């Protein structure tokens, strides 16, 4: 027996043999998005004190530009621009420590000792290919917590072609991306001549000893050659081209500068840029949660996220660029003895904008304390299926892993394929 609620939620399509997924696959429409910026909130922000205010927060809820929707008082700029965002309040993920949770949200898979999974950025890079001579996948700035976290953003068995280029912190006075220009004593013509000679020798060597490592090296060499001989690539990394007023708007710290760099890079042709300006476990507020959110974390997030979305819109890039602001989980409903909140993957929030997605809405809900999802559970597989759909990528695709196991690119809980969040798709 089909109850009325189930009939409505299915849109009656199931009666005719069509699920929501079938409909979306049959009518993908023309993709509007061609790039993604992930604003990475490492450590996990408190959803209760930001986008899903509750009575167990010490911060007041404030009105937003959306009728009936409130954010925390710590997010006034976002509240004024809430119509530019879609806030998902019903994320439900796995992993209760930073390594496990980071791996899960970046790959959609739980940690498996038998293999490493490719990141969503690497998948998008593989499926969409590069544009111009700009590296398609970039992490800025490179990790300061050790190689382990950086590895989660890598391509794994997809190959080094799809690993992110990890660049230094652009907020540092000595910031420089090395090897983007030729020595003054070397002309471009001579480089091209030397390149032809190198290719001849290289072909002979590989004919004797063909390995996967050489294939990757070949791709890296080609990419490097494009980069150093294309002025537009060097300019993409040159923040001196930006007016000081805009830098102030983003913020001249690592948070603001990494997002400004991300905008420059997608504008130049990058496919997926992670703006990781929050160093270490910035949002990991096991102690002094309120003070950290009030004095240090939320002001920079509120300032920079709004500046990024506004800047993209002013440049005509917002419809083609998906912006995702998220960490690896939320924080506990209860305050611990150190006045902090601990890790909480059961229910948390994130914000998305751009890419032709339907903004100006809140999706999902949690209970009165923000402890559990009460409406519209959304997994990482669902989120990434939505992103893939917006980019024109088949979200049902699977890759064959080196151990002979098919890997879903939009993997959800219970090893199923995620479903696009229908509310987000125009």
Image (cartoon, rainbow, N blue to C red):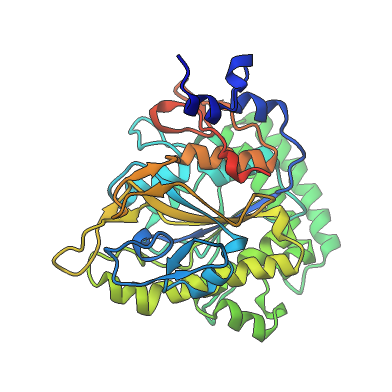
- Is residue 179 in view from this perspective? no
Rendered residue at 78%/54% (across/down) = 194
Q: Quadrant of residue 8?
A: top right
Q: Is residue 171 above or below residue 400?
A: below
Disc count in the image? Answer: 0
Quarter of the rendering occupied by the N terminus: top left
- Horizontally, residue 20 falls left or right of residue 335, namely right
**Which residue shows up at 48% across the image and 68% down it?**
277
- Please state the horizontal and vertical placement of residue 179, each as a whole percent of the image: 65, 65
Which quadrant would the C terminus be assigned to in this image? top right
- In the visual, does 341 lie left or right of 219? left
Residue 1 visible in the current orientation: yes
- Does residue 228 appear left or right of residue 46 in this picture? right
Residue at the front extreme of this rendering: 4
How far across and how far down the image is residue 417, in percent? 50, 28
Rendered view: 311 above or below 134: below
Task: Depth check: give the residue in front, 68 or 407.
Answer: 68
In-front residue for pair 26/312: 26
Corner quadrant of residue 294 = bottom left
Q: x%, y% of residue 301? A: 48, 70
């Amino acid at each position: 027996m089909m109850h009325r609620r189930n009939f409505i939620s299915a849109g009656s399509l199931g009666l005719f043999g069509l699920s929501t997924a079938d409909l979306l696959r049959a009518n993908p429409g023309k993709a509007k998005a061609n790039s993604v910026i992930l604003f990475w909130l490492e450590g996990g922000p408190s959803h209760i004190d930001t986008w899903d205010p509750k009575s167990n927060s010490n911060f007041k809820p404030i009105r937003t530009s959306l009728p009936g929707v409130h954010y925390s008082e710590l997010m006034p700029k976002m509240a004024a621009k809430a119509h530019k965002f879609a806030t998902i309040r019903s994320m439900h993920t796995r992993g209760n420590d930073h390594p496990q949770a980071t791996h899960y949200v970046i790959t959609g898979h739980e940690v498996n000792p038998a293999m490493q999974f490719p990141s969503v950025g690497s998948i998008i890079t593989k499926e969409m290919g590069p544009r111009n001579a700009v590296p398609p996948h970039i992490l800025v700035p490179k990790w300061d917590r050790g190689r382990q976290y950086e590895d989660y953003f890598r391509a794994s068995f997809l190959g080094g072609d799809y690993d992110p280029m990890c660049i230094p912190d652009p907020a540092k006075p000595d910031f420089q991306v090395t090897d983007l220009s030729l020595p003054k004593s070397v002309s471009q013509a001579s480089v091209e001549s030397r390149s032809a000679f190198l290719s001849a020798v290289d072909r002979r060597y590989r004919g004797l000893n063909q390995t996967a490592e050489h294939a990757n090296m070949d791709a890296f060499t080609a990419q490097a050659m494009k980069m150093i001989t294309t002025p537009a690539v060097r300019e993409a990394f040159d923040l001196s081209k930006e007016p000081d007023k805009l830098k102030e708007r983003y913020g001249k710290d690592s948070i603001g500068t990494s997002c400004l760099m991300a905008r420059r890079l997608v504008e130049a042709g990058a496919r997926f840029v992670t703006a990781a300006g929050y160093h270490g476990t910035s949002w990991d507020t096991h102690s002094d949660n309120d003070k950290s959110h009030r004095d240090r974390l939320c002001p920079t997030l509120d300032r920079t996220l709004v500046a990024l979305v506004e800047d993209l819109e002013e440049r005509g890039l917002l419809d083609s660029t998906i912006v995702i602001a998220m960490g690896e989980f939320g924080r506990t409903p209860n305050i611990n003895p150190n006045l902090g909140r601990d890790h909480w993957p059961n229910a948390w929030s994130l914000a998305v904008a751009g890419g032709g997605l339907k903004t100006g809405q809140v999706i999902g809900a949690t209970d009165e304390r923000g402890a559990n999802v009460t409406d519209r559970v959304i997994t990482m597989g669902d989120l990434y299926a939505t992103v893939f759909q917006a980019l024109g990528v088949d979200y049902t695709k699977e890759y064959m892993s080196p151990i002979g196991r098919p890997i879903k690119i939009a993997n959800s809980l219970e090893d199923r394929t995620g479903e696009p969040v229908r509310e987000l798709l125009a």
